[in-house]
Amino acid sequence: MLATAGLVAGIWVPGVAFAANVGVVVYFIAAAVAHIRARFTGQSFWVNCLGMLALSAAVLIFSFL
């Protein structure tokens, strides 16, 4: 919920949007590491976890470069 609030607040304050977006990317990196350490690399890992990581990383790259 805080990431959503940060991204919405970032419409008016660009630094907040960048920080929130970096936080979302770090969250999905941590989720991917946790999935790999738990050896849970089924279809839901590839679609959900890595898909959202790729999407959030793409938003970060295309929004701030």
Image: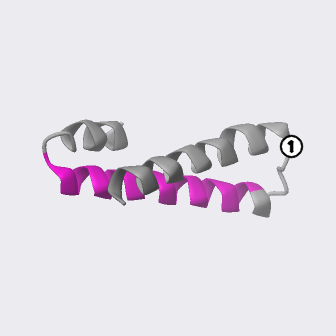
What is the crowding at mark 1: few (fewer than 14 residues within 10 Å), some, or many (at least 20)? Answer: few
- Quadrant housing the N terminus: top left
Residue shown at the point (38%, 52%) measured from the top left: 21
Q: Let me know if residue 26 is in the magenta part.
A: yes
Residue 28, visible in the rendered structure: yes
**Above or below 8: residue 33:** below
Q: Position of residue 4 (x, y in %)?
A: 34, 37
Residue 23, visible in the rendered structure: no
Q: Is 61 or 20 nearer to us in this picture? A: 61
Answer with left or right where residue 56 lies relative to residue 29: left
Residue shown at the point (62%, 54%) measured from the top left: 31
Residue shown at the point (19%, 40%) measured from the top left: 9
List the residue tagged with mark 1: 42
Q: Amino acid at mark 1?
A: Gly
Q: Quadrant of residue 44?
A: top right
Read off the magenta span: 13-35
Q: Position of residue 7 (x, y in %)?
A: 30, 41
Answer with left or right where residue 6 lies relative to residue 59: left
Secondary element under disc 1, as helix, strand or loop, is loop
Answer with left or right where residue 47 lies relative to residue 55: right
Residue shown at the point (85%, 57%) measured from the top left: 39
Asked which colour scheme the image uses, the reply is: one colour
Q: Position of residue 26 (x, y in %)?
A: 49, 60
